[in-house]
Image (cartoon, rainbow, N blue to C red):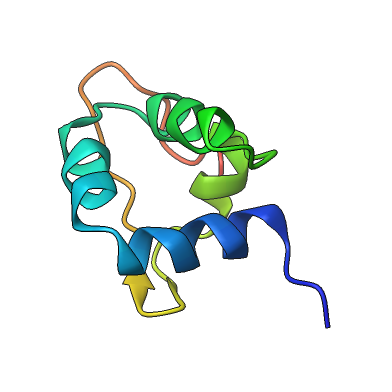
Amino acid sequence: MTSSPVQAFLAQLARDPRLQAQVQAAVTADEVALLAQRLGYAVSGGDLLLLSGRSVDGVRVTRVDHPGEYPGRYY
């Protein structure tokens, strides 16, 4: 069974402490998506936001609300 690019990225994230630090330093989902894209995964910020509140491959995806954003835009 083939996993989605998002699942494959999150699986790598679960195994890579250096990547985890980069993701934690990112401010937006789009920045995290750029990290994924640099590693060859076709992931968008919207893909990540759709997983907010869920755990995939041991990685909990959490959306952080920033002032000035539109609540409910991606969920």
Residue in the picture at 34% in, 68% down: 14
Q: Is residue 15 visible?
A: yes
Say left or right for 61 vs 74.
left
- Image quadrant containing the N terminus: bottom right
Residue 17 percent coordinates (x, y): 19, 57
Residue 74 percent coordinates (x, y): 56, 41
Q: Is residue 75 visible?
A: no
Say left or right for 26 vs 53.
left
Could you say which is closer to the camera, residue 6 or residue 48?
Answer: 6
Outermost residue on the right side: it is 1
Total marks placed: 0
Outermost residue on the top side: it is 68
Could you say which is closer to the camera, residue 63 or residue 14?
Answer: 14
Residue 30 percent coordinates (x, y): 46, 26
Could you say which is closer to the camera, residue 34 or residue 67?
Answer: 34
User: Looking at the image, is 12 positioned above or below residue 19?
Assistant: below
User: Looking at the image, is 52 positioned above or below residue 11?
Assistant: above
Residue 20 percent coordinates (x, y): 23, 51
Residue in the picture at 36% in, 79% down: 58
Say left or right for 21 vs 55.
left
Which of the 4 image quadrants contains residue 16? Answer: bottom left
Residue in the picture at 25% in, 30% down: 26
Say left or right for 12 vs 41.
left
